[in-house]
Image (spheres, helix red, strand yellow):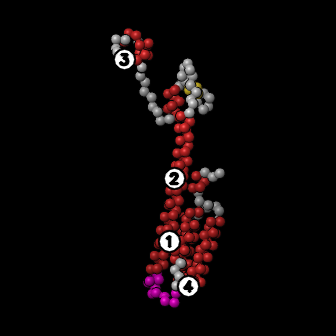
């Protein structure tokens, strides 16, 4: 069973996601090549970029992104009989690279936030389990009122709750204890 921390580390050691991204890129490029300039395959280049962004590291993602832009540019250059001017071709490739990079960066950041959310949810579940444990039966001594902790040791009520919750204690005397401990102060009326 994998933890959120293991899931936070993209498969950098495993080359399978990089290879899969390259295969999808090659298939997309070939489909773009064989269908010609009349069919616009621009959006299908997002698939290998998205896959690489989610499952690989930054360097692999940006390498796939640049490869996708070059592939798109070459297909457009060699299949389109109506070649635009060089400046327009340069503009097209720059816009393509920029849009692919924005997609790669956005998906990488989204994945980081998604992993953080998973880790926070795991911590929340752990905290809720701990709170639930505090709601259940609590072994307390009938004489001295010490509480038995999870390790089987007996500790003061204050110590137990300070260690297992966010409760802070203040001390005072109830009216019965004041009468019992300080009978000379019985002139004061207590409710």
Q: Is label 3 in a helix, a strand or a loop?
A: loop
Disc 3 or 1, which lies upstream in sequence?
A: 1
Q: Is residue 63 visible?
A: no
The image shows residue 56 at horizontal and vertical percentages of 59, 63
CA gap, disc 3 to disc 4? 94 Å
Q: What whole-number distance in Å separates the C-alpha atoms at marks 2 and 3?
A: 52 Å
Q: Quadrant of residue 63?
A: bottom right
Residue at numbered disc 2: 117
Look at discs 1 and 2 and give the one toward the viewer: 2
Across and down, in percent, residue 165 comes to 50, 35
Against 182, residue 53 (above or below) is below
Badges 3 and 4: C-beta atoms under 8 Å apart? no
Magenta residues span: 77-90
Q: Could you tell me which quadrant the C terminus lies in?
A: top left
Q: Which residue is mark 4?
A: 36
Q: Earlier in the sequence, mark 2 or mark 4?
A: 4
Q: Position of residue 14 (x, y in %)?
A: 65, 62
């Amino acid at each position: 069973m994998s933890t959120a921390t293991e899931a936070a580390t993209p498969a950098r050691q495993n080359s399978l996601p990089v290879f899969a991204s390259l295969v999808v890129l090659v298939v997309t490029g070939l489909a773009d090549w064989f269908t010609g300039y009349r069919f616009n395959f621009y959006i299908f280049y997002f698939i290998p970029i998205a896959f690489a962004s989610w499952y690989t590291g930054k360097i692999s993602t940006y390498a796939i992104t640049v490869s996708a832009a070059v592939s798109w540019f070459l297909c457009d250059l060699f299949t389109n009989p109506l070649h635009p001017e060089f400046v327009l071709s340069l503009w097209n490739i720059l816009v393509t690279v920029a849009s692919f990079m924005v997609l790669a960066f956005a998906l990488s950041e989204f994945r980081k936030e998604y992993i953080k959310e998973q880790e926070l949810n795991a911590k929340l579940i752990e905290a809720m389990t701990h709170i639930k444990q505090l709601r259940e039966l609590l072994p307390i001594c009938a004489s001295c009122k010490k509480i038995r902790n999870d390790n089987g040791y007996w500790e003061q009520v204050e110590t137990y709750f300070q260690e297992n919750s966010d409760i802070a204690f203040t001390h005072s005397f109830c009216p019965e204890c004041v009468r019992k401990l300080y009978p000379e102060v019985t002139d004061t009326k207590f409710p």
